[in-house]
Image (cartoon, rainbow, N blue to C red):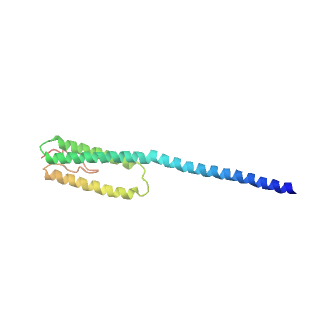
């Protein structure tokens, strides 16, 4: 009778160890899967998004520099061509970024960015008119095939 009790205690202890091992293994695998999904998301979406947004930001700063130079030196004709090229490159970076999947909440923030781009385009057009340039739409989705040379 005493051996039966000892056997039951040993069996319960062994079963507890096995269940604890299986539970820890499952939890570890579950956490590893979550980490892998996060790493894949970073690799497939976040890193390319950051790269495209950084490229767009750099091109925006370049565009800003070109506009300042064009306003300071209106007689230089190729400035307007450079502005047009820079604006196209900015559009390309933004378009590549927009092709990537968005994280939750990113679409709302992107709406603000689109309004900012539209304001920038309006300012570029205003500056172009103010400097007697013939620059019809140079904005997002606009017609940039027209010459931006001074009138």
Q: Position of residue 27 (x, y in %)?
A: 61, 52
Residue 145 can be seen, yes or no: no
Q: Residue furthest right?
A: 1
Q: Position of residue 55 (x, y in %)?
A: 33, 45
- Classify residue 127 as left or right of residue 48: left
Quarter-wise, where is residue 58 in the image?
top left
Q: Position of residue 108 (x, y in %)?
A: 38, 59
Q: Position of residue 141 (x, y in %)?
A: 29, 50
Q: Name the one closer to the observer, 8 or 40.
A: 8
Q: Residue at x 20, y 52 (%)?
A: 125
Q: How many marks?
A: 0
- Classify residue 92 as left or right of residue 129: right
Where is the N terminus found, in terms of image quarters?
Answer: bottom right
Examine the rendered structure and indicate whether residue 146 appears above or below residue 119. above
Q: Residue at x 51, y 48 (%)?
A: 37
Residue 125 can be seen, yes or no: yes
Quarter-wise, where is residue 8 in the image?
bottom right
Q: Residue at x 22, y 46 (%)?
A: 65
Q: Name the one closer to the observer, 123 or 20.
A: 20
- Classify residue 87 as left or right of residue 5: left
């Amino acid at each position: 009778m005493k051996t039966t009790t000892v056997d039951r205690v040993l069996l319960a202890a062994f079963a507890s160890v096995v269940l604890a091992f299986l539970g820890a293994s499952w939890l570890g695998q579950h956490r590893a899967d979550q980490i892998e999904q996060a790493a894949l998301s970073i690799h497939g979406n976040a890193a390319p998004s950051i790269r495209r947004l950084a490229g767009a930001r750099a091109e925006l700063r370049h565009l800003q520099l070109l506009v300042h130079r064009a306003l300071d030196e209106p007689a230089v004709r190729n400035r307007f061509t450079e502005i047009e090229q820079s604006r196209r490159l900015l559009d390309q970076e933004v378009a590549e970024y927009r092709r990537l999947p968005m994280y939750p909440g990113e679409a709302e923030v992107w709406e603000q960015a689109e309004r900012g781009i539209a304001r920038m385009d309006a300012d570029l057009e205003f500056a172009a008119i103010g400097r007697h340039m013939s620059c019809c739409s140079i904005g997002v989705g606009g017609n940039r095939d027209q010459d931006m040379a001074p009138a």
